[in-house]
Amino acid sequence: MSDKEKVWKFCMDMLLEKQKGIQQLIADARAASNNDTKSSMGDKYETTREMMQIEINKLQLQLQECGQMLLALKVIDPEKRSEIAESGALVFTDKINFFIATGIGRVQVENQSWMVVSSSSPIGKSMQGKKVGDLLTTQAFHAKILQIS
């Protein structure tokens, strides 16, 4: 299995696990809200239900974002070799290695650190179309591209 396949699979597994966890939290919050009984303290019941609904709404947004990240990964062919920095490419620099896919951040795969970034992020945009030997420059980051796969 290539580095790209390993990083891609790690990210997919991580996001699927996160998605499952969020779905469980939503189910638990709904169950807690439905099991809450009306008390003699007047508005306490309605306030609790409203607070639970706010929490469920936040979790649903997180679930939607996770789904979008999974979708971005699913369209990537981990077996495709890239000659330029583009969505789905691994970009090795003299400072850090990147996987241009979705905005996950730093991950550790088999003792190797990767920065998983979206192609629409500032660093992702600055990499687009770059080739081996090109300089990667943003306001806060300067590196030389050593390899792309």
Image (cartoon, rainbow, N blue to C red):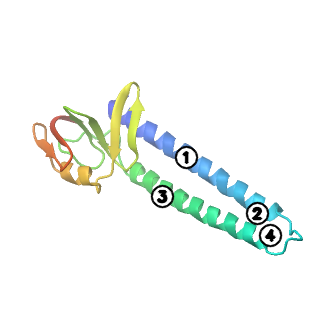
Q: Estimate the x, y position of residue 83 in percent, counting from the top left.
A: 18, 41
Marks 1 & 2, CB-CB < 8 Å contact:
no
Residue at the spot of label 4: 45
| Label 4 crowd bin: few (<14), some (14–19), many (20+), radius 10 Å | some
SS label for mark 3: helix
Which is more N-terminal, label 3 or label 2? 2
Marks 3 & 1, CB-CB < 8 Å contact:
no
Nearer mark to the viewer, of 1 and 2: 2
Nearest to the observer: residue 49 or residue 80: 49
Nearer mark to the viewer, of 4 and 1: 4
Which amino acid does the dot numbered 4 rest on?
A: Tyr
| Label 1 crowd bin: few (<14), some (14–19), many (20+), radius 10 Å | some
Please give left or right for residue 8 compared with residue 83 in the image.
Answer: right
Q: CA distance from mark 4 to mark 3?
A: 31 Å
Q: Estimate the x, y position of residue 92 in percent, counting from the top left.
A: 23, 34
Mark drawn on residue 18: 1
Which is more N-terminal, label 1 or label 3? 1
| Label 2 crowd bin: few (<14), some (14–19), many (20+), radius 10 Å | some
